[in-house]
Image (cartoon, coloured by chain):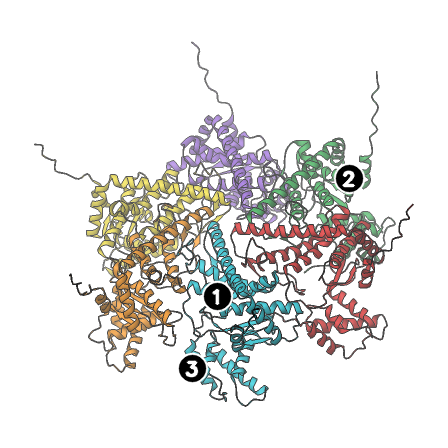
Chain colours: A yellow, B purple, C green, D red, E cyan, F orange
Amino acid sequence: VLVDRPEKLGRVQILNVHSRKIHLGADVDLETVAALTPGFTGADLANLVNEAALMATRRGGDEVTLADFTAAIERIVAGLEKRNRLLNPHEREVVAYHEMGHTLVALSLPGSDVVHKVSIIPRGIGSLGYTIQRPTEDRFLMTRQELENKMAVLLGGRAAETIVFGELSTGAADDLQKVTDIARSMVTRYGMSPELGQVTYERDTHNFLGSQTPTPPWNERSYSEETGREIDKVLKSVVDRAFARTVDLLKAKRDVLERGARQLLERETLDEADLAALLRPQLVPEPVQS
Amino acid sequence: VLVDRPEKLGRVQILNVHSRKIHLGADVDLETVAALTPGFTGADLANLVNEAALMATRRGGDEVTLADFTAAIERIVAGLEKRNRLLNPHEREVVAYHEMGHTLVALSLPGSDVVHKVSIIPRGIGSLGYTIQRPTEDRFLMTRQELENKMAVLLGGRAAETIVFGELSTGAADDLQKVTDIARSMVTRYGMSPELGQVTYERDTHNFLGSQTPTPPWNERSYSEETGREIDKVLKSVVDRAFARTVDLLKAKRDVLERGARQLLERETLDEADLAALLRPQLVPEPVQS
Amino acid sequence: VLVDRPEKLGRVQILNVHSRKIHLGADVDLETVAALTPGFTGADLANLVNEAALMATRRGGDEVTLADFTAAIERIVAGLEKRNRLLNPHEREVVAYHEMGHTLVALSLPGSDVVHKVSIIPRGIGSLGYTIQRPTEDRFLMTRQELENKMAVLLGGRAAETIVFGELSTGAADDLQKVTDIARSMVTRYGMSPELGQVTYERDTHNFLGSQTPTPPWNERSYSEETGREIDKVLKSVVDRAFARTVDLLKAKRDVLERGARQLLERETLDEADLAALLRPQLVPEPVQS
Amino acid sequence: VLVDRPEKLGRVQILNVHSRKIHLGADVDLETVAALTPGFTGADLANLVNEAALMATRRGGDEVTLADFTAAIERIVAGLEKRNRLLNPHEREVVAYHEMGHTLVALSLPGSDVVHKVSIIPRGIGSLGYTIQRPTEDRFLMTRQELENKMAVLLGGRAAETIVFGELSTGAADDLQKVTDIARSMVTRYGMSPELGQVTYERDTHNFLGSQTPTPPWNERSYSEETGREIDKVLKSVVDRAFARTVDLLKAKRDVLERGARQLLERETLDEADLAALLRPQLVPEPVQS
Amino acid sequence: VLVDRPEKLGRVQILNVHSRKIHLGADVDLETVAALTPGFTGADLANLVNEAALMATRRGGDEVTLADFTAAIERIVAGLEKRNRLLNPHEREVVAYHEMGHTLVALSLPGSDVVHKVSIIPRGIGSLGYTIQRPTEDRFLMTRQELENKMAVLLGGRAAETIVFGELSTGAADDLQKVTDIARSMVTRYGMSPELGQVTYERDTHNFLGSQTPTPPWNERSYSEETGREIDKVLKSVVDRAFARTVDLLKAKRDVLERGARQLLERETLDEADLAALLRPQLVPEPVQS
Amino acid sequence: VLVDRPEKLGRVQILNVHSRKIHLGADVDLETVAALTPGFTGADLANLVNEAALMATRRGGDEVTLADFTAAIERIVAGLEKRNRLLNPHEREVVAYHEMGHTLVALSLPGSDVVHKVSIIPRGIGSLGYTIQRPTEDRFLMTRQELENKMAVLLGGRAAETIVFGELSTGAADDLQKVTDIARSMVTRYGMSPELGQVTYERDTHNFLGSQTPTPPWNERSYSEETGREIDKVLKSVVDRAFARTVDLLKAKRDVLERGARQLLERETLDEADLAALLRPQLVPEPVQS
């Protein structure tokens, strides 16, 4: 069944209801919490408030702070921290550049969701690092340009690995899957490719607008082999272009990428303020002219 | 099972029966209500009368007016209003032009169903705006020309977006699906393409004549790959032509489109009278000749 | 399970048994009733006698007449009259020409079943008009020529629409499906196409000889894509030829078509005698030579 | 489960056991009865003895004769007589030539099973006539030549129709299906086509050696499309050749075909002796030389 | 579930256990019995000892001899003797040459399993003759050469038929199926074709090493049509080559083939000693020189 | 369901818990045991400790030594020893070179997991020999180079057979399957082929990082035939290159391969120390210069 997930305004209202019985810290703005939880149902939000309160109790606090909420969201979205998952130094370095790649692309493309946090602490099953974005608003429509930006953010990890290490790793498999899903929808459902026209080639219930439900295995299709080949080609060229663009973008900011990855390796996690500082022009001592 | 839905005359009779126990306002003509409810079963109509009576009670009225019936129909057909669904200003603008696109094409093509209401109030699950048409009569046969007009009305939304914003958005996905269904039926079931002849290539129980049942996932097919490719090509060219025609039509009425979208942004909803006024030639002060 | 439906002689015997308890009108010849009911099982015939008796009772008659039997057959075969189904004048005209097309082709091709009645009174679910043929005998074998004639009768509706209105409508969808089934069987099961030889390409339990059971969805197939393409091509050319022939036939009798359709629009239903009169050469006043 | 049907010797033994309690006529040789019942299980044979005894009782005989056995076999194999199935004279003529075609090819090809009876009395569901062959022995191996002869006998019906009427009818559909099955097995299971080699392309449990079980719908296949196309082509050419050969054979015996069909139309059924007489050279009065 | 069948050594041990309670004849070497029963489970071996004891009892012997074991194995592996299955003389001749073909190829190729017995006594369901080989040892690895030899032995039957009768019969269908399975595995699972490389194209649980379990219907496949076509071609050429080689081998030993088949027709069964004698150079009286 | 298997650190902790009640030998370092058990769940590790204790008891030891743990791991991973599985001398030789091939490639490629043991003692169902590697660390990311090395180790067996015997055997079937899985994932899931780009073509839950779960039958696919052909070609060329590289590597170390295989034939099993000795440069008496 199709669940009608609450919009941001609805989430604020639901959070308000569930927060009545707990002491909220002065720094907690439920609008911010709502912004971090697109796609959460009412039940998810109730659970979130409980988890945040638990976090506060565990650390002996008497108020539930924004940090408690953020930690609870991370736990729900990305799973438990897995500090036992000891990556070797090279793997850890690859992960740092990979996550910094996602983050830097998101920071660079106008209109991308705010990067709330980037981390190389392994979490949940299989994750080695993560980047959490915070949409400033729920989105209901996306343009082709916005979808292309979304693909660029997803490809930022692999692009960074390619630029820095000149090597491909298995770490981008999930990203490639999401990029392929977006490109496929652009071509087969949103009529965004001139070659294939304003025709629907596949159907599904999948959407890219803030939903965090797992993607269905594969879409139903209804076209001939030759049309299928055309779709494959256009889909590949859409992804190729997005990747080339992402590589160019990161190459142009190679120094920020390097600094960011270094900081991430040192501090494991960077938040919004850290990232803002990172992007600020560096004070470079002027070369003294002779 | 195949339900035998009542024709318009039958709907009038059914509405008469169910309305006996309520006070109908002077402005209620059950023929108009019947015209707005093609595809409703007897049970749907009984429900409609109840909903309309409830609307009247809620607003404290002592008669059930046509406005109550219209509101009840909108609620049944398009779902509850979702005023929490806060679109950003650009999204709202895109939706306004999109809906005005549908409406203007419907107003321009002879023989199209009357536009009863156009609105940018979000409703139900996922809808951002809607255009309600009122067939002046039930239809039992449609010509190729009429199906092409139906496709043009459906493509009006995307055509308006393209003309005004020069950008494609995800908002037309449902429209493209319906257009593809019509074009596919023209080619594979109605023998309307000279290239493919008077042969049936697919079968289903789907019809376009006033039915509001959801379309089945995909039709059963029985043809070779090469014939499938031919179908794909003809289908695409049917849709391409329909889109080009729709764009031309809206470009020629660009000023009405602009005025309509502006009004929609201001007033959220336009009814039949508003639309009639919109189409009336504007009094433009004659340029004074020197 | 495969039901062994009674032959005409068997139907006469069964009708005899069931008619013992009712007063048959003098005009009732059970042979004629049997001729109108190919494919009826024993149970269907028992039901028919009851329905006919009911018809007589309803109209206050004390004998069951042939008209009662005919009305009962129409009700069983085509469903209840749907006088609420109000077509608009143009639709009604299209239906009249469409039905007259079927009828006129049947009247013109030697060996076609006698046309017992043609009507534009809507009946059952979805039907807008109907032509009832009465086989003079049960048929057990059909030649290629006879199958082609059957296709021509089925295509007569659309051919008439094309000639008169120059437009294609959705009203021929069912006819095209039946034509496609016949052409497919000629090619894939009856070895009637020289290109594909005396080979069976598909299997089903479907037959065209007086059976009124619904056709199975699609046949099982066992051939390569390229052979499938050959089948598609031959099938299309068989249907194309049949359509061209039907159009030629109706063009040559355009005047009878016009007169017949006009009469049908006036009188809604024409019977065997009316059709015989229609075909009689018209007395045209000789132009006076000056 | 796979039933191990008794061989001829076994059938004689089983018939012996079941016949102990009945009076067998002097003309009954159980070897002959066993020869007419290849593929019968023990239960089928027990049933046969009962049916034959019943036949004798019905006709008031005090012994069970060979004719009783033959009638019982016909009833079991081909179904009840359907004397109500009144074919029109042309259909009856077509059936007579069709059955005579099967019979004459069987009589002409060395090594074919003896034709025990040919008849145009309709029987069972759908059958319009039948030819019963009596293998002189059970067969366990068949050569390519023997399979080709089997195809020729099956195609004899359609070949006769083509020669005599110059028209194709629907009556050969079952024959074509059986011919296609044999040709497909030659190509895909028996390695009998040089083009496709000694490779197995399909598998089934189907056999042509005296079995009367219904053929399975379609075989499982495991090959590429292009190989499938090659199979289609070789299969068609095998059937084309078999048909051409059958036509030639019947053309060369046109006079016997005509005489046989005439006799069949007059007498409805011909037995082994009648057929032997038919084949005997005709005494034609010598033309007197002037 | 995957049964772990005992190796030869294990079989000897199991046979020892089960034979404790019976009197074994002096000629019984359980190693030989174990060699004749590759693929037997513990339960199968227990059953074998019982069957062999039963054989001894039936013939009134007081010891269980090797002949009893051999007879019990034949009954288990090939089914009951079917002496009722009376082949005609030509069929019997074909079977004799066919079986002698298998046997002679097995005797001629170095490394083939010893032929323990060849027979033309029909057995079980459908078998007309059989050749029983006795591996001198269990095999765990097979080379390409050994698989090719295995194919040659399987093709020996048809090759003999072709050479002697110049005709193909249906009798080789099972052999062709097994040959196709081996060739397909060489190409798709064992990486033995240079054209297709060291890639796995199909997967199954099937093995050729002494297993007597029935082959699964068809393997799962995962490749494109064009690759499938390549596989078909290579597979066919592997089988073609194997067949040509087998024909050459038998042609070169035509005289032994003839003598062997003659002996088989006379004596129905030949054992290891008979075959050794058959292969011994014949004493041909020297032609006397003049 | 997706099991979250413990990382190495977690395995050490779990082993610690389960080992509390047993006497560990002085030579047991639980870190080493953890390194040998990647992919083991908590339950597997508990079972391992029990099995190792049982081993100690059986051999009458009062401490559980590292050898007990190793033996227990071998039994769990590779199954029971099957000393009844008597290979013939040639098969045994092939197996020795095959296993030595795997081992030598693993020893030669930088970054490969340490070879803990290589053996030609048959174990479990179907295995004829085995090579156990010990990852020095859990791995979470793999580069293209590392995947290629993994393929080379897997192909080492067949490469050795080819070099030494010039013949292909069935023994590499499992290796080829694993190599194909890796190559397929590189191409269709990890975006590692320039020809096919950063697009996901198949999806599964399969991973190569230390997991010992059986591979799923085949992946779900979503692409046209022509794209499928491209994938087939790239996949084959990836495997071809890996095989050529492996052959070159082993040819260059032919002497070590020979010595290793000889030692394996003599001693059945070689451990880490034996292999280190094997690789040490041989003291070859200098040829005396004349």
| Residue E90, image x, y percentages | 65, 67
Indicate the secondary structure of the residue bearing disc 1.
Answer: helix
Q: Along the line of sight, which residue is nearer the eye, B236 or D205?
A: D205
Q: Give the mark nearer the N terminus: 3 vs 1.
A: 3
Chain ID, mark 2:
C
Judging by the rendered image, the residue that carries numbered circle 1 is E150
Amino acid type shown at disc 1:
Lys
Front of the two marks 1 and 2: 1
Amino acid type shown at disc 2:
Leu
**CB of mark 2 within 8 Å of CB of mark 3?**
no
Look at the picture and state if D131 lies above or below E275: above
Spatial CA span between label 2 and label 3: 89 Å
Amino acid type shown at disc 3:
Gln
| Residue C179, image x, y percentages | 67, 44
Q: Along the line of sight, which residue is nearer the eye, B140 or B271?
A: B140
Tell me the residue at 42%/66% (across/down).
E142
Q: Which mark is residue E13?
A: 3
Instruction: Tell me: F34 left or right of E106.
Output: left
Front of the two marks 2 and 3: 3
* Residue ranking furthest to the front: E290
Q: Along the line of sight, which residue is nearer the eye, B184 or E29?
A: E29
